[in-house]
Image (cartoon, helix red, strand yellow):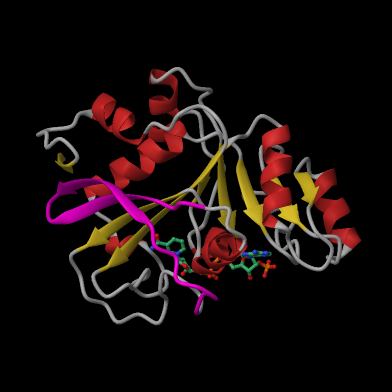
Amino acid sequence: MRRLLPDPAAELDDAALVEAYRLPAGRSLRVDFVASLDGSVTVEGRSGGLGSPGDKRVFRTLRALADVVLVGHGTAAAEGYRPVAADSAVGRLRTVIGRPASAPVAVVSRRASLAPGDRLAVPSTILVTCAATDAGRRAALADAGVTVLVCGEEDVDLPAALDALAERGLEQVLCEGGPALLSAALAAEVVDELDLSIAPALVGSPDRLLAGPLTGVVRPRLVQVLEEDGVLFTRYAVDR
Ligand SMILES: NC(=O)c1ccc[n+]([C@@H]2O[C@H](COP(=O)([O-])OP(=O)(O)OC[C@H]3O[C@@H](n4cnc5c(N)ncnc54)[C@H](OP(=O)(O)O)[C@@H]3O)[C@@H](O)[C@H]2O)c1
């Protein structure tokens, strides 16, 4: 993998890739997505068809740097999310860079859609939901050891959710989508960075980066571009 912008450089090793994505200390919400040239984010319902070895490296690097992985329930279900395992490639990279080997996964779900028995219904998982959801579901998940954060009344209040995560020491948040959660996060003006991998593919999928029109155009600022095998790994700052 090479850096095109800023300061062109060849052959970024794992340590250089970590530095390329490291954030200053303090709170942040960065969003990681892979999209095709036409803005599709799925091939046959999943992101895997857009992946590449470089994209997997960036995905691992971003997870290694994060305090918590935030994901919408639609993505967690479609992509078969599991807890971040200490003995995985991410866990090993986290250890190498001096971080706890695992990081919690925080699932955003208005309806508290996780079910006791789900792969993610374990004590390391955080459920971010709202008061309107079924109290029995919330209680069952809490009984399974899941940390249940009730943020908002009728819908999930994302700024309140990020405050609640930060109060637990989870300040650097990696949001892995999906489109509904990204749209809500942009509307709530809580996104600091978009890390978009652009795969050289044309797909025509109905699943796009955003779930619908935003009320105003957001204009992220390009801060970095890496490249490998024709895939561009962009880092955009979202000024609030
Ligand atoms: N290419 C990529 O990088 C990439 C990344 C992520 C996802 N994807 C793809 O995107 C698809 C999923 O899209 P999606 O839009 O359904 O995903 P999503 O945003 O992950 O999930 C939507 C669901 O998550 C919950 N949710 C999201 N935002 C919420 C909010 N602000 N407040 C309350 N609940 C919220 C709701 O769950 P409840 O219904 O339980 O309330 C909602 O139905 C999958 O096919 C996945 O493969 C691709």
Q: At x 51% / y 35%, what residue is drawn? A: 85
Is residue 122 at least partly visible in the picture?
Answer: no
Tell me if residue 113 comes above or below residue 215 in the rendering: above
Is residue 68 at least partly visible in the picture?
Answer: yes
The image quadrant that residue 49 belongs to is bottom left
Given residues 123 and 13, the one toward you in this image is 13
Q: At x 73% / y 65%, what residue is drawn? A: 110
As for residue 121 lying within the magenta part, the answer is: no
The image quadrant that residue 38 belongs to is bottom left
In the rendered structure, which segment of residues is drawn in magenta?
Answer: 213-240
Q: At x 71% / y 42%, what residue is drawn? A: 163
Given residues 117 and 128, the one toward you in this image is 128
In x, y percent, where is residue 92? 40, 26
In x, y percent, where is residue 158? 67, 55
**Which quadrant does ligand 1 occupy?**
bottom right
In x, y percent, where is residue 78? 51, 65
The image quadrant that residue 105 belongs to is top right
Left or right of 105: which side holds 90? Answer: left
